Amino acid sequence: MKFAEMLEARSSSANTLLCVGLDPDPVRFPEPLRGVDDSIFQFCSAIVDATADFVCAFKPQIAYFASAAAEDALQRLVSYIQTAHPTVPVILDAKRGDMASTAQHYAREVFERYRAHAVTLSPYLGHDSVQPYLEYDDRGVFLLCRTSNPGGDDLQMLNVDGEPLYERVARLATTWNSSRQIGLVVGATYPNELARVRAIVGDMPLLVPGIGAQGGDVAASVKAGQTSRGAGIVVSSSRAIIYAGQKEQFAANARAAAQSARDEINRYRVAMD
């Protein structure tokens, strides 16, 4: 099954647009896991099991694993998700972007080493830097378009022949998407731009980070980003869910936070066909 089909099937069957981001920072772990061997895997797998009922995807952030020399934990985590929750796709948040010869190796890392279903990429080096990932025809990519951080304005709002750069990225993505593997990253902190991107790209999937700890407006983001069928967006929340509790019941607290986020998102969806 291709990534887009897997994502749509999961979103429909579980009635959810929520993606839980897995950003394991040991200094923020609950007390029972501090100083414990293999705590990164134990923490993340507990969060996965607790929240899986409410998600359309999981999104591990590779830097949190790599900075702790825990790449092995990331490999085991993706394998665990695919075994324990096989209908839930994994989006590796890597934000890679390099020339084609190097991108081939990054693509191998993402899709063969970690076996993720999709990856986040920077489009700054152009189509030939993205193409190696598209050679894996059952996988997906999300290109950075209008990111949720304030510094995104430095480049993404630059005027390019009468339109901001983020809109040019969205238009380019539609021309690169002949295999229907491409989506875009557009932050929940910018619902007006999110609506503009949706108007440009049609039904292309949008990964929407920025709710929760970053303060994105859930109602405005869902209304701006969803397709006419109440689908097409993957609304990501990380810290507000995975660090919802700091004691023995941390996983139960994360589950409650995920259910609440899923339900809030669904309140603003249009009815499915």
Image (cartoon, grey):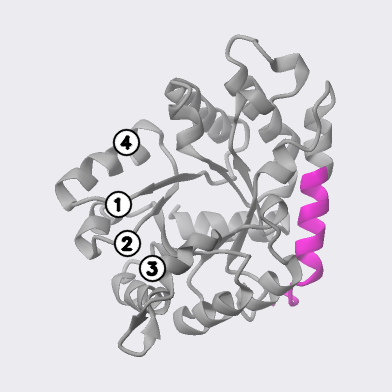
Report the mark closest to the observer, 1 or 4. Answer: 1
Residue 264 at x, y percent in the picture: 81, 61
Q: Which residue is disc 3 drawn over?
A: 155
38 in relation to 239, above or below: above
**Residue pictured at 81% horizontal, 32% vertical:** 245
Residue ID at (70%, 50%): 213
Front one among 38 and 165: 165
* Contact flag, marks 4 and 2 (Cβ < 8 Å): no
* Cα–Cα span, label 3 and label 1: 16 Å
Cα–Cα gap, marks 4 and 2: 18 Å
Estimate how packed mark 4 is, as few (under 14), some (14 to 19) or many (20 or more) residues with alpha carbons within 10 Å.
Answer: few
Residue type at mark 3: give it.
Leu
Tag 1 and tag 2, C-beta contact below 8 Å: yes
Q: Nearer the viewer, mark 3 or mark 1?
A: 3
Front tag of 4 and 3:
3
Looking at the image, is mark 4 or mark 3 earlier in the sequence? 4
Is label 3 or label 2 in front?
3
Q: Where does label 2 land, which residue? A: 123
Q: Quadrant of residue 51?
A: top right
**Labels 3 and 1: the sequence-earlier one:** 1
Q: In percent of the image, x 60 and y 79: which residue is there?
A: 192
Find residue 145 and report its horizontal and vertical position in percent: 44, 67
Mark 1 or 4, nearer chain start? 1
SS category of the residue bearing label 2: loop
